[in-house]
Image: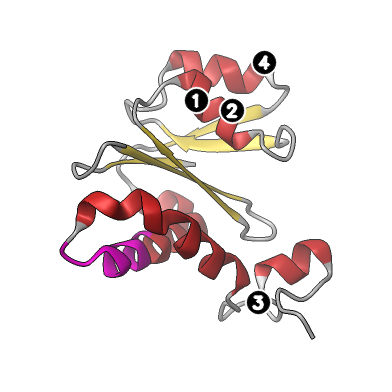
Amino acid sequence: MDAVHIKAGRCKYLVLARDDFSGWPETVALTMLSSKSVSESICRYGAPKEVTVDGGDEFRKDLKESVKRAGSRIRITTPYYPKSEGMIERGHKQLKDSLLKMCGENGSKWKEYLPIVTFADRISTKKNRILPIRASIWSESCFAN
């Protein structure tokens, strides 16, 4: 999981979470970065077995407690060192780059493009995957036949 501060627009934070096994991304735009809002967003499909966060300031003690209360184990990596979470950080970078390209000069509308960019990430086939992420989770195609 990662939190990114974005200066443009009303929502100031982008929280990204990605499943290690499937690569499924979850994204949420927040006006304030609070442990309650972050923990609600990561438990959309139930509590994960383990949550990995970097030790940055955005993941304060109260968030760590919320994750533990949900029944998940928390693993803390070195803050500001993306190599410690290689696959996840690469996925986050692709998503952030796509969002930046969609916004162009008007960065204040990033929240409007977030669902489209997240959807595109979910249905795209990655180099190290045979199936798009959605198909690997639900065993179905993303498109109508």
Which badge, 3 or 1, comes first in the chain's sequence?
Answer: 1
Left or right position of 92 against 126: left
Which badge, 4 or 2, comes first in the chain's sequence?
Answer: 2
Front residue of 16 and 54: 16
Residue occupying the point 51% across, 19% down: 36
Front residue of 84 and 24: 24
Q: Which residue is mark 4?
A: 69
Residue 128 in percent (x, y) is at 60, 77
Q: Which residue is mark 1?
A: 37
Q: Residue furthest right?
A: 139
Label 2 vs label 1: CA separation?
A: 5 Å
Which structural element holds mark 2? helix
Label 1 vs label 4: CA separation?
A: 14 Å
Which badge, 4 or 3, comes first in the chain's sequence?
Answer: 4
Q: Which residue is mark 3?
A: 129
The boundaries of the magenta stretch are 96-105
Crowding at dot 3, Cα within 10 Å, few <14 / some 14-19 / many 20+, comes out as few
Residue occupying the point 52% across, 70% down: 120
Q: Which residue type does callout 4 highlight? A: Arg
Which badge, 2 or 3, comes first in the chain's sequence?
Answer: 2
Q: Which residue is mark 2?
A: 40
Q: Are marks 2 and 1 in contact (CB under 8 Å)?
A: yes
